Amino acid sequence: MTKPLVVSIPHRLGKEEALRRMKAGLGSARTQYAQLIQVNEEVWSGDRLAFSVTAMKQQVSGFMDVFEDHVRLEVTLPWLLSRLAHGIQGVIQKKGTLMLDKK
């Protein structure tokens, strides 16, 4: 079992606006990356998202928590994808920051 990949994305939006933007951004990301990622489960419970996806034929699961000043994503990657964790972490950080940028 590999250790979880944890990404923290700071913001200055407040919890409600960050939550709204993350929900909207995840919806468009699901469409944009449909050929790479299949969403198996997406359950929001308050400010927490529990999810399960298939990426590159590998099962991935995790949680996303939205806080007043940051979003924390914890993803459990299978061995194959954990070898790519550094690159995956950078992509998540960049895409998450774009979702939370002021418009």
Image (tube, rainbow, N blue to C red):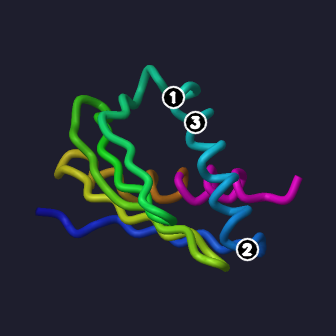
Q: Which residue is drawn at 66% across and 79% down?
A: 69
- Give the extent of the magenta segment: 92-103
For mark 1, what is the residue?
Answer: 33
Mark 1 or mark 3: name the one nearer the start of the chain: 3
Q: Gap between marks 1 and 3, in whole Å? A: 10 Å
Q: Which residue is drawn at 77% across and 75% down?
A: 12
Q: Residues within 10 Å of mark 1 (few under 14, many from 20)?
A: few
Tag nearer the camera, 1 or 2: 2
Decide: is 6 above or below 27.
Answer: below
For mark 2, what is the residue?
Answer: 14
- Magenta-drawn stretch contains 100: yes
For mark 3, what is the residue?
Answer: 27
Q: What element carries label 2?
A: loop
Q: Residue at x 30, y 31 (%)?
A: 56
Amino acid type, residue under disc 1 in the picture = Tyr
Give how far across and how far down residue 80 sits, in percent: 20, 45
Mark 1 or mark 2: name the one nearer the start of the chain: 2
Q: Is mark 3 on a helix, strand or loop?
A: helix
Give how far across and how far down residue 25 sits, in percent: 64, 43
Report the quarter where the N terminus lies.
Answer: bottom left
Amino acid type, residue under disc 2 in the picture = Gly
Decide: is 50 above or below 32.
Answer: below
Q: Gap between marks 2 and 3, in whole Å? A: 20 Å
Mark 2 or mark 3: name the one nearer the start of the chain: 2
